[in-house]
Image: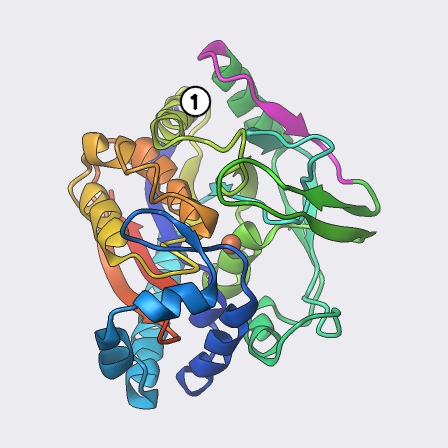
């Protein structure tokens, strides 16, 4: 039977790829972000409203170039360490858990869980001339490289996982190929998403939640992948912590039921809290992962899980998939980048078995 040989996860915020000296530039971008949340109660506020109420310690303790640089360097060391461990593990397959942000899925048909089981998935480097792209996101986009990668995905393991999930009462969507051009709208929906986001149809391949690990910490390895996309970010059918954890558990059972001697790793990227840093939520999630405590992971407070902080649920799913195996945190940096407390909880973690 197949074996699970470890799990690997990291955040994928631009802060993971934007040199510390430039973090302030990303802070300026936040002034026009319409998805800002107050960590204490989940209220949806404007940048100005957040700024007026923000703890002055954010500015005095965090918003200095030397602090940015030190956090960035720690993140890079941890990502390098994760890459080295991934290369050393050298899995035959990866089951990747990620989300999609205005990439492949829109409101014409947005699945809560979708498993890709085609032969390959194309990674396209970022279009650096995209309208509206800021300097900070342009610099950070270099992590996605300059080469198109035809990444191998695995129809056999993909089909096996779909069938096993269906047997376990998960009504998953599936995909075997992508349309030549994909676009659409998202929102307005319930809760925090009170406006419409629109993407003109364009060529789009592998979503960033999968591309980031491939480009940043797969170390040139190309183990066959089964990408599982969960809708973390967009109401109304966004996944709950309980369901994300249960999905991970069912994925584990599916892998262990696969009648091969394959060595399979679980990978994920995204989170932790953003676009306002919520250290309380981040530390709660990390505690649940470090102690392999399903109770903590399945009861992460829903009012805090809004906007892209919900990407933390990719990690929760990995927690479910890894059962009693505890995560080792390679780094956690609260990536504050503006006096309003905007930024991202940046984390890197490894589950060794
Ligand atoms: Fe993301």
| Identity of the residue drawn at 44% across and 69% down | 48
- Please identify the quadrant where the N terminus is shown: top left
Q: Quadrant of residue 100?
A: top right
| Magenta highlight on residue 173 | yes
Q: Is residue 105 above or below residue 252?
A: below
Q: Quadrant of residue 246?
A: top left
Q: Quadrant of residue 194?
A: top right
**Residue that mark 1 sits on:** 254
| Identity of the residue drawn at 64% across and 30% down | 155
- In terms of secondary structure, what is the magenta stretch mainly? loop
| Magenta highlight on residue 282 | no
Residue 351: % across, % down:
27, 47
User: Does residue 324 appear anywhere in the picture?
Assistant: no
The number of discs equals: 1
Residue 222: % across, % down:
55, 53
Q: Which residues are magenta?
A: 167-178
Residue 130: % across, % down:
74, 69
Left or right side of 248 for 234: right
Depth check: give the residue in front, 97 or 37.
Answer: 37
Depth check: give the residue in front, 330 or 42.
Answer: 42
């Amino acid at each position: 039977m197949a074996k699970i040989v470890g799990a690997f996860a990291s955040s994928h915020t631009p802060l993971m790829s934007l040199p510390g000296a430039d973090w302030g530039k990303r802070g300026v971008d936040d002034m026009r972000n319409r998805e800002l949340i107050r960590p204490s109660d989940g209220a949806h506020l404007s940048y100005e409203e957040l700024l007026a109420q923000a703890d002055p310690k954010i500015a005095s303790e965090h918003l200095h170039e030397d602090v940015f640089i030190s956090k960035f360097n720690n993140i890079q060391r941890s990502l390098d360490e994760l890459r080295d461990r991934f290369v050393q593990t050298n899995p035959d397959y990866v089951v990747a858990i990620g989300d999609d942000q205005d990439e492949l899925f829109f409101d014409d048909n947005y699945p809560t869980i979708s498993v890709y089981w085609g032969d390959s998935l194309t990674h396209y480097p970022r279009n650096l001339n995209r309208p509206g792209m800021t300097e900070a996101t342009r610099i950070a986009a270099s992590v996605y490289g300059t080469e198109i990668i035809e990444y191998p995905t695995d129809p056999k393991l993909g089909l096996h996982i779909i069938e096993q999930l269906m047997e376990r009462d998960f009504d998953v969507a599936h995909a075997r190929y992508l349309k030549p051009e994909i676009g659409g709208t998202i929102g307005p929906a319930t809760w925090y998403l009170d406006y419409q986001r629109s993407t003109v149809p364009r060529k789009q391949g592998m979503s960033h939640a999968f591309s980031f690990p491939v480009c940043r910490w797969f170390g040139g390895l190309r183990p066959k992948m089964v990408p599982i996309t969960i809708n973390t970010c967009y109401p109304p059918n966004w996944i709950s912590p309980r369901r994300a954890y249960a999905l991970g558990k069912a994925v584990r059972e599916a892998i262990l039921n696969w009648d091969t001697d394959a060595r399979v790793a679980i990978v994920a990227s995204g989170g932790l809290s953003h676009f306002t840093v919520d250290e309380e939520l981040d530390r709660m999630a990390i505690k649940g992962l470090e102690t392999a405590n399903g109770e903590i992971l399945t009861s992460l407070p829903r009012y805090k899980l809004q906007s892209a902080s919900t990407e933390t649920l990719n990690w929760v799913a990995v927690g479910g998939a890894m059962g009693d195996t505890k995560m080792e945190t390679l780094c956690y940096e609260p990536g504050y980048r503006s006096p309003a407390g905007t930024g991202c909880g940046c984390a890197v973690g490894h589950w060794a078995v």
